[in-house]
Image: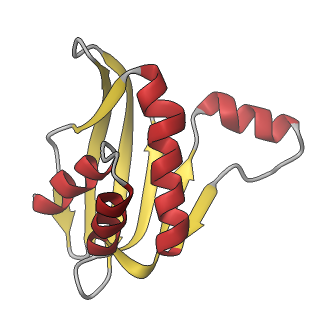
Amino acid sequence: MDLVERYVALWKETGADARRKAIELLWHEDGVHLLQPPREMRDRAIALGFGDAVLAARGYAAIEERVRRGYEDFLAPAGVTLRAGGNTDRLGDTVKFNWELVDGSGQLRSTGLEVLTLAADGRIAVDHQFFES
């Protein structure tokens, strides 16, 4: 599915202009990206008294910052890249697929699940991102 291929490519994009354009083509203008962080981050948040460790980014600027920081702070330093798991499925306005973070040798480092709810124009209205391992 083209949407998933473009989504995965976005998380590898290093150019600010290209990244912004890709976000505008993928997300509805008031779209939201909801991230359930990895377990250790959630556990630390709970220990600090935060009952909800979900991280939300709404609108182009916030999503762009989320993607940029995800790449610059996590993916690039760890030497990993994102790829689709090959199990994309769609039911009405909902698309789901698993993703994998792999290192330069192709070794699997982490997995997750993406659940996208699409707006009427086919762009992402709500993006639910879960780390699974």
The quarter of the rendered structure image containing the C terminus is top left
Q: Position of residue 64 (x, y in %)?
A: 47, 61
* Residue reaching furthest to the bottom: 120
| Left or right: 77 as drawn, with respect to 114 | right
Left or right, 37 with respect to 133, comes to: right
Residue 88 horizontal/vertical position (percent): 17, 51
Comparing 119 with 96, the one in front is 119
Work out whether residue 74 can be spotted: yes
85 or 59, which lies in front? 59
Q: Coloring scheme of the render? A: secondary structure
The answer to whether residue 133 shows anywhere in this view is no
Decide: is 39 above or below 30: above
Q: Residue at x 73, y 53 (%)?
A: 52
Q: Position of residue 16 (x, y in %)?
A: 39, 57
Q: Quadrant of residue 79?
A: top left
Left or right, residue 48 beside residue 7: right
Quarter containing the N terminus: bottom left
Q: Residue at x 26, y 48 (%)?
A: 8
Residue 91: x %, y % from top left: 20, 68
**What residue is rendered at 26% in x and 76% in y?**
93
Q: How many marks?
A: 0
Q: Residue furthest left?
A: 1
Q: Judge by depth and name the residue closer to the eye, 84 or 47.
A: 84
Q: Report the residue at 68% width, 34% height from top.
A: 41
Task: Name the quadrant containing residue 58.
Answer: bottom right
